[in-house]
Image (cartoon, rainbow, N blue to C red):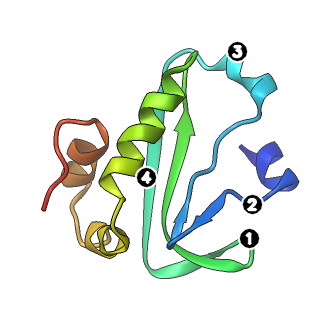
Amino acid sequence: MLQRELTFSTNIGNGIALPHGVEAAKKSVKRSGIAVMVFPEGTDWGGEMVKLVIGIAGAGEEHLEILSIIAECLADPADVERITGCSAEEILTMFTGKRCPQ
């Protein structure tokens, strides 16, 4: 992830950053997972403020499924603001694909 950030920022706009590893590191991923960090007041990420940082490690092609779930749950710009008030349990439920809390 650090190597990717040195190449370009993983800030995707709308207050969201999706840090992930470089292609060469993919074979080292033993099991898929995410790390979610919420910054209600925002934090500087590549020169822009983000409120939600979702680190992704996908084994094989599982990163595509993970990205799909994230995209679905964050389709509306208001979703990022709503997530900053969610509990860790609610965020886990959201990003494991079980459901997106309203």
The answer to which of marks 1 and 4 sits earlier in the sequence is: 4
Give the x, y percent position of residue 49: 59, 80
Q: Nearer the viewer, residue 77 or 57?
A: 77
Residue pushed farthest right?
7
Distance between mark 2 and mark 1 Cα atoms: 5 Å
Quickly name the residue at label 4. 36
Give the x, y percent position of residue 102: 12, 62
Q: Residue at x 78, y 46 (%)?
A: 4
Q: Is residue 66 above or below residue 8?
A: above
Hey, what amino acid is under mark 2? Answer: Ser
Hey, what amino acid is under mark 4? Answer: Val
Secondary structure at badge 4 equals strand
Quickly name the residue at label 2. 9
Residue 27 numbered tag: 3
Q: How many marks?
A: 4
Residues at marks 1 and 4 touching, judged by CB atoms closer than 8 Å: no
Q: Residue at x 31, y 43 (%)?
A: 95
The answer to which of marks 4 and 2 sits earlier in the sequence is: 2
Dot 1: within a 10 Å radius of its alpha carbon, few (fewer than 14), some, or many (20 or more) residues?
some
Q: Is residue 85 above or below residue 26?
A: below
Residue pushed farthest bottom?
41
Hey, what amino acid is under mark 3? Answer: Lys
Quickly name the residue at label 1. 46
Q: Quadrant of residue 46?
A: bottom right
